[in-house]
Image: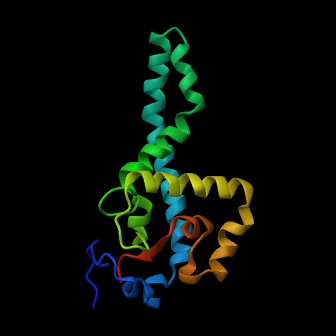
Amino acid sequence: MRSNTYSDVTPGLQGSLDEARLYDGVRSRRVLAFCIDYLIVGLLLVPVSIIVALLGVITLGLGWVLFGVLGPIVAIVYVYTTLGSARQATWGMRAMSLRLERLDGGRVEGTLAVLHSVLFWVANGLLTPLILLVTLFADRKRTLHDLLLGTVVIRADR
């Protein structure tokens, strides 16, 4: 029986990631987790936008240039600090009891988390229908960016 801790998968043991119950409902939970994370990033943009607006006033408008990159910067910092943490999950993923795992058993670090997110957005921008279609045919319900990075999203509550 698995506990609800975030260190259930023993590093290097591929077999523990092969259990089918770890992937029940992962696809729909990922979509809901994405929606929650999108909302959280939107909420985080409010105070950061206020700070940038004040910075723009102080710098006579020069600071307002940051508004062009504010969304991606906030999202990258959010992903780096949450998905790259010891829990290996964003707040939306935690709400949906999901966790990102590396197939080699290593820990997901901040740079891998950001790369995972950036690849998602690039693939989503270029190949929108393929993002979820790949999960229908790939092993372990993996998306295109999961396949490229050697990662998998599993249920953390199993």
User: Residue furthest toward the top?
Assistant: 60
Quarter of the image for residue 72 reads top right
Residue at 50%, 69% (x, y): give it.
150
Instruction: Where is residue 33? Give x, y as percent.
Output: 49, 64
Instruction: Where is residue 128? Give x, y as percent.
Output: 72, 61
Residue at 48%, 10% (x, y): give it.
59
The quarter of the picture where the C terminus appears is: bottom left
Q: Nearer the viewer, residue 35 or 82?
A: 82
Quarter of the image for residue 86 reads bottom left
23 relative to 29, above or below: below
Relative to 84, is 68 on the left or the right?
Answer: right
Instruction: Give the colour scheme of this rendering.
Output: rainbow
Relative to 105, is 134 on the left or the right?
Answer: right
Q: Nearer the viewer, residue 77 or 107?
A: 107
Instruction: Where is residue 49? Give x, y as percent.
Output: 49, 30
The quarter of the picture where the N terminus appears is: bottom left
Residue at 44%, 11% (x, y): give it.
58
Label total for image: 0
